[in-house]
Image: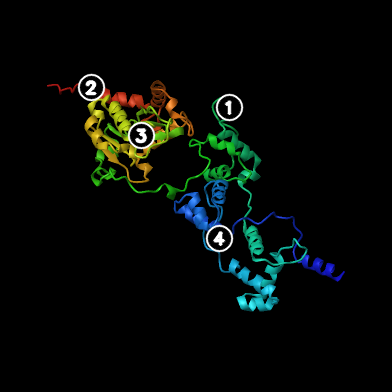
Amino acid sequence: MGAVRRRAADRAGRPRMRSPGRPPVARREHRQRFWVAIARGVSSEDAAAAAGVSTATGSRWFRESGGMPPLSLRPTSSRYLSFSEREEIALLRAGGAGVREIARQLRRSPSTISRELRRNAATRSGRLEYRASTGQWHADRRARRPKPAKLVTNEKLRRYVQERLAGTITTPEGVGGPAVRWRISHEAIYQSLYVQGRGALRRELTACLRTGRALRVPRARTRGRGKGFVRPEIMISERPAEADDRAVPGHWEGDLILGLGSSAIGTLVERTTRYLMLLYLPRLGGHGEEPRVKNGPALAGHGAEAVRDAIAASILALPEQLRRSLTWDQGAEMAEHAQLRIDAGIEIYFCDPHSPWQRGSNENANGLLRQYFPRGTDLSRHSPDQLAAVALALNSRPRKTLGWHTPAEALNDHLLTCAAPATSPSP
């Protein structure tokens, strides 16, 4: 009877709670090492190896957190017990040391040791048995901040955001809706979509985003070395000043948008008028019929030679005054830029690595095009006529930056101005 009372008295030191489940496969410091590696730009597999966990665990961490670290990456403050200190407590406790003896050896307050033994002990056996791994698990679990998101606590706001993301029309004039008295940041919406378990927005609403991404990609992961064919004299810093201020038409920005199965569509945007041209890049014969050959021909249709020919065909269809320069990123598809300069009679310049804002007009156009060519779809199924129809739709859309004229109207006005004969002053 005395043993039963003693066990009941021991358990009384901690409030009764439901089982929180089994301990995770790794501790907080493992997760921190994983996300620090992700921040350096490595893959989930390599980050898992650096953290000392399996590849499947690292991939699950990345997916469940939406590509964003769910915990602080700063080292834990020394005011909290570390795992090594908990191991010392477990060893000393197993050796029969008392609370004050353990506190003296660890140079901690006796109350800290007493609280640790009481709050973070394992009770599955009906007694307070202290183990370092279980103690660390309880501490990490208690340190989490389960602060409910704004979209969880405010049902009206959540419904409002979900309807707008899904494109629900509520008034004849457009999306509309009631007068909104609250504010919510785009970051709160992104986190509710990307992070599993937030319980706010439906995961499938990620398909309604313009990018269609379900995970964030760490910025450092996209960093790499520049291409060997890019020389200093053809960098964007050497581009004429008239291209920077958009005063003279004829300076273009280009890029590829990629789809399923390495399909691609080329895009060219004129900086002054925002006029858009789309490049048809069909797959070559033999694509997908046999294993890919390293350093073999680019059967996907957007190799350097195919892109060179497509750009040259589109540029040569323009008047000479509209063939001044072309700015591209440092993609391998532009390895034939020297021959393209000769074939099309246009100067080629390259952006700095990882600087998409240097092609701002083109990046904006690519974002608009994703409404017609969503991510994860096969872009090779679109014919040249379909590409021309999409380009016409965007070139016929009024733009605020053009004084609500369309890109087609702006380009046509420029061509008419150039074609008008010069008038001599009257005598």
Q: Of circles 1 and 2, which is in front?
A: 2
Q: Quadrant of residue 72?
A: bottom right
Answer whether labels 4 and 3 touch (C-beta < 8 Å): no
Of residues 220 and 86, the one drawn nearer to the viewer in this rendering:
86
Q: CA distance from mark 4 to mark 3?
A: 44 Å
Task: Name the amino acid type tagged 1.
Answer: Thr
Answer whether labels 3 and 1 touch (C-beta < 8 Å): no
Q: Secondary structure at mark 4?
A: helix
Q: Quadrant of the N terminus?
A: bottom right
Nearer-N-terminus badge (4/1):
4
Q: Is residue 179 visible?
A: no
> What x and y, as percent, mark residue 80?
60, 67
| Residue identifier under label 2 | 419
Nearer-N-terminus badge (3/1):
1
Q: Of circles 2 and 4, which is in front?
A: 4
Task: Name the amino acid type tagged 3.
Answer: Ala
Instruction: State left or right for residue 324 relative to residue 262.
Output: left
| Residue identifier under label 3 | 298
Instruction: State left or right for residue 61 relative to residue 141.
Output: left
Of residues 72 and 286, the one drawn nearer to the viewer in this rendering:
286
| Residue identifier under label 1 | 171
Q: Quadrant of residue 262?
A: top left
> What x and y, as percent, mark residue 215?
52, 43
| Residue identifier under label 4 | 29
Of residues 123 and 210, the one drawn nearer to the viewer in this rendering:
123
Nearer-N-terminus badge (2/4):
4
Q: Quadrant of residue 347?
A: top left
